[in-house]
Amino acid sequence: MSALSAQRPTARGPPSSTLASISTTPCANRLMAHVLIVDDNEINLRICKSLCELLGFTSEFARDGLEAVDAVRIGKFDLVLMDVCMPNMDGVEATLAIRSMSGVRAEVPIIAVTANAEPSEIKTYLQAGMRAVVEKPIRVSRLFEAIGDVFEAAAES
C-alpha cells in the first residue's frame, strides 16, 4: 500500500462523533469554513484538501510561509493548516508574522501539520501562536479532533 493510499479517507468519512463535535462550532455551522492549507508538498496539499472537503470546508493553497503570510494579509480564512518545514519562510516564522498583524487576521487559528513533533518542538510551535499540532503522516481522526478543539476554543473566547 502506498503512502498516499494509506492516507486517503474512506468513503465512510470521519467518525460521526468527530463530525458532531466539529459541526456544533460556530465556524462549522456556516457550513463553508474557508481553510488556508500551507505545505510545500503536493501530496500533503491534496490530502488536506480532501479532508477539508469531507467537512464541507473550502480551501486555498500556499506553498511556503511567505505565500501564507500574504494570503492571510489579503484573504479571509477561518483556519490555517501550516506545515513547519518549508522553503523561503518556515511555519513558525509565518505564524509569528501572522500573529503580529493587526485585527482579526492575527487571531486566525493555526494548526501545525508536521513530521517534527517532539515535545520541545511542539512547545516552540505553541509558543509561536499555533493552537494545535497534528503529526505527519496525518491521521484523519487526529486532524478532525484538532480542528474541532480549535473551533471549540475559539467559540468559547
Image (spheres, rainbow, N blue to C red):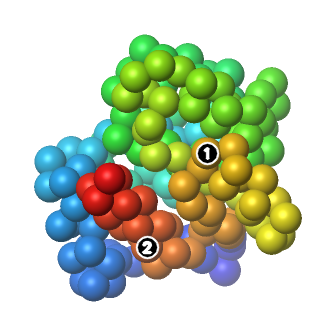
Badge 1 marks a residue whose secondary structure is loop
Q: Nearer the viewer, residue 3 or 103?
A: 103
Badge 2 marks a residue whose secondary structure is helix
Q: Residue furthest front?
A: 157
Is residue 57 visible to the viewer in this orientation of the structure?
yes
Q: Position of residue 89 (x, y in %)?
A: 77, 28
Q: Position of residue 59 (x, y in %)?
A: 38, 40
Q: Which residue is mark 1?
A: 129
Number of the front mark, 1 or 2? 1
Q: Position of residue 131 (x, y in %)?
A: 54, 55
Q: Quadrant location of the N terminus?
A: bottom right
How many C-alpha atoms fall within 10 Å of the one at disc 1: few (<14), some, or many (≥20)?
many
How many C-alpha atoms fall within 10 Å of the one at disc 2: few (<14), some, or many (≥20)?
some
Vertical order, 111 against 16 (above or below): above
Which residue shows up at 48% across the image and 25% down it? 72
Which residue shows up at 47% across the image and 19% down it? 102
Q: Which residue is mark 2?
A: 145
Q: Are marks 1 and 2 in contact (CB under 8 Å)?
A: no
Which residue shows up at 21% across the image and 76% down it? 20
